[in-house]
Image: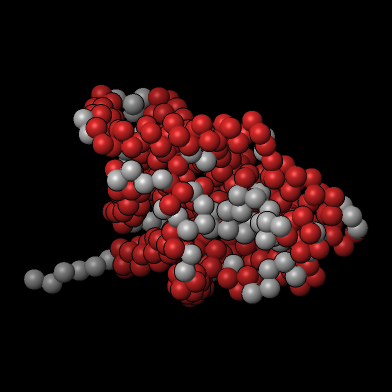
Amino acid sequence: MKIKFKRQTITEYFSSIIILVFFMMRTLIAIQGDQIYSIIALSLGILALLNVVLNLKRSKLRPFIMLSVIYFFMVISNIISGNMELGLIFNLQYMGIALSLIYFKLNYKLTKISYLIHALYILYFIVLGFNPAEIFYFSRNQISSVMIVQSIILYISIVQHDKNVSIIPAVITTLISAWALGRSGMISSVFLLSVILLYKRRTKLLNKNAFIKLIIIIGIIVISPQIIDNLISNIENNFLMLTSRFEREGFGARQLIIIEYFNIAFGNIKNFAFGPSIDSSQYLMLFEGNLHNSYLGMHAYYGLGGLICIGYLIISGVRNLTKSKSWVYLGLLGVMFIRIFTDNLAFPGYFDPLIYYFLFSNYHHKYAFNRIDLRE
């Protein structure tokens, strides 16, 4: 008996594996800080870009052209400002993964497995009573970023395959973010949970089965004294430290970075048009050029031309999502817009592929090689 595979299924698996392993590499970079994972992620992004280019037809060029124009502005801006240098090559990976998400459908089973791997990995450290600051190489703020990305990828796949929009991934992500206790991560995770709850209430999908699943998860946590003790103690300790720091500093360095950035950005016409050279500011270089705000990066790395293009794409994308009543997607996009306000996660960053996917999602049913209707 011969087993037949549809070309669409093979394409879905191949593109999904590239996308999910790419984000897995981004997680490993956050955990270990090893450059080998950056090289693997770059290779996967370039492979994804080549896969899209080889399958492109003239009638499906719009997303490719628009992202290419944005990348062009990045190149021009950074030739003049010198903010990224080799980073220009590395940022091709985000374009490749973004186009793969736009042009190909995700495999539901693989996205579910990817989410479970990430969630179980972090829950393992919660059970053992680790401090969240000890898990990731760079910052505990990365914990919420990783889980938000995995949740959003899973919810995209759920919508694409017309599955029941479960609240469980949002609940787990919110609990983990509360444990890690980064301010922006907590706010965006709670917003994620609110989006899913509001959607289910609106569509009357918040049924008895959903509540039973939620009760089971809560019950498992409650009946395990070690888990609940570690979770609560870490939240309490981190919350006291966080509130003390906030009372002492407010938004501290981030607020001063924004003020300093605007001072040099409006310092002359060149800085305003192409983005300022970050290393020209001694204050910004105290943070190794980390602007701690993706919206500032939109100007610093893309210049005024790129800023206008991305701004136009955001406005048109949000308008199209609203017109098509794609409320889940609009809410998930809002989650990322909140999260990137206090960290360099987008423009450019590994949130880019998901942001661009949502902004082009109304075109997806026209341009995707395996067509689907994404409207809710």
Query: Could you say where residue 113 lies in the image, as x and y percent from the top left?
Result: 29, 54
Outermost right residue: 268
Relative to 374, 220 lies left or right: left
**Which residue does the image show at 66% across and 49% down from the upper left?**
293
Looking at the picture, does residue 351 appear above or below residue 25? above
Residue 19 versus residue 251 in the image, above or below = below
Q: Eyeballing the image, is 187 above or below 52?
A: above
Residue 316 appears in view: no
Direction from residue 348 to residue 234 in the image, left or right:
left
Colouring method of the image: secondary structure
Identity of the residue drawn at 33% across and 43% down: 129
| Image point (47%, 45%), residue name | 144
Q: Position of residue 336 (x, y in %)?
A: 55, 44
Number of marks in the image?
Answer: 0
Q: Is residue 164 visible?
A: yes
Where is residue 254? Give x, y as percent: 69, 45
Residue 333 x/y as whole percent: 54, 43
- Is the C terminus in the top left, top right, bottom left or bottom right quadrant? top left
Furthest residue toward left:
1
Q: Nearer the viewer, residue 21 or 230?
A: 230
Image quarter of the N terminus:
bottom left
- Depth check, front residue: 266 or 140: 140
Q: Is residue 2 left or right of residue 5?
A: left
153 lies left or right of 297 = left
User: What residue is at 56 percent from the left and 43 percent from the top?
Assistant: 339
Q: Is residue 370 above or below residue 187?
A: below
